[in-house]
Image: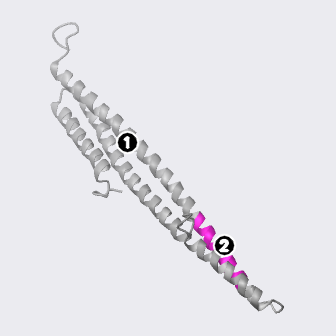
């Protein structure tokens, strides 16, 4: 303080404003990061569910195929009945392999799982950029705060530069999360 009671150095006002802006962007970055993290977790669960259903369909198909082979080897089985049963099971296995109407065929399940994986990967890429941006804002706040105490103007400039870098990381996370691979 200088100039008496209540007067604040104008450079400290500028640093306080810088700190406020950095804090604002820090809050934005943390909100975006949390949202991306939640999306990634949800998409990961969705992918795991789709792959589990895919595996269940595969196991069921294998059981039917084995049953068809076994029934054909039964010595007392009627050839017509065996043929009819094997044809019914073949239709069921074909439906389990691909069923566009219900979306529950193995091909459709694999496509859903891969789409969920892509969403997860995009959200994780965004999350990492948002977290780096948030770290830049936090360090910028610390440096700008240290300028108030020490009076070293370079600290405020470094804090502002980190703020710009943080904004850049948020923008990359938002618009081009796969442009830079950091993790």
Q: Where 25 sits versus 93, above or below?
A: above
* Part of the protein shown in magenta: 53-68
Which quadrant of the figure has residue 145? Answer: top left
Q: Which-is-in-front pick, marks 2 and 1?
A: 2
Q: Position of residue 132 (x, y in %)?
A: 33, 46
Which quarter of the rendering shows the C terminus?
A: bottom left
| Disc marking residue 32 | 1
> Where does label 2 land, which residue?
60
Q: Position of residue 182 (x, y in %)?
A: 32, 56
Q: Seen in the image, is 31 located left or right of residue 105?
A: left
Q: Residue furthest top?
A: 5
Which quarter of the rendering shows the N terminus?
A: top left
Residue at image position (29%, 38%) is: 137
Which quadrant of the figure has residue 14? Answer: top left
Please report whichever mark, 2 or 1, sits nearer to the chain's N-terminal start. 1
Front-lying residue, 163 or 100:
100
Which is the main secondary structure of the residues drawn in magenta? helix
How many C-alpha atoms fall within 10 Å of the one at disc 1: few (<14), some, or many (≥20)?
many
Verify whether residue 57 appears in magenta: yes
User: How far is the residue under mark 2 from the one under mark 1?
Assistant: 42 Å
Which quadrant of the figure has residue 161? Answer: top left
Q: Position of residue 139 (x, y in %)?
A: 29, 38
């Amino acid at each position: 303080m200088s100039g008496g009671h209540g007067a604040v150095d104008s450079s400290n006002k500028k640093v306080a404003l810088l700190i406020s802006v950095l804090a604002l962007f820090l809050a934005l970055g943390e909100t975006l990061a949390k949202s991306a993290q939640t999306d990634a977790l949800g998409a990961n669960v969705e992918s795991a569910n789709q792959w589990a259903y895919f595996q269940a369909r595969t196991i069921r198909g294998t059981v039917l195929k084995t049953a068809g082979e076994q029934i054909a080897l039964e010595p007392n089985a009627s050839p017509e009945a065996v043929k009819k049963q094997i044809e019914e099971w073949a239709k069921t296995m074909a439906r389990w392999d691909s069923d566009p109407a219900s979306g529950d065929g193995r091909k459709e399940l694999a496509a859903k799982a891969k789409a969920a994986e892509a969403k997860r990967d995009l959200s994780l890429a965004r999350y990492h950029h948002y977290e780096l941006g948030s770290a830049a804002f936090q360090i910028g706040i610390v440096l700008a705060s240290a300028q108030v105490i020490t009076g070293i103007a370079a600290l405020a400039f470094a804090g502002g530069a980190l703020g710009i870098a943080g904004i850049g990381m948020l923008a990359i996370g938002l618009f081009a999360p796969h442009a830079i691979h950091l993790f």
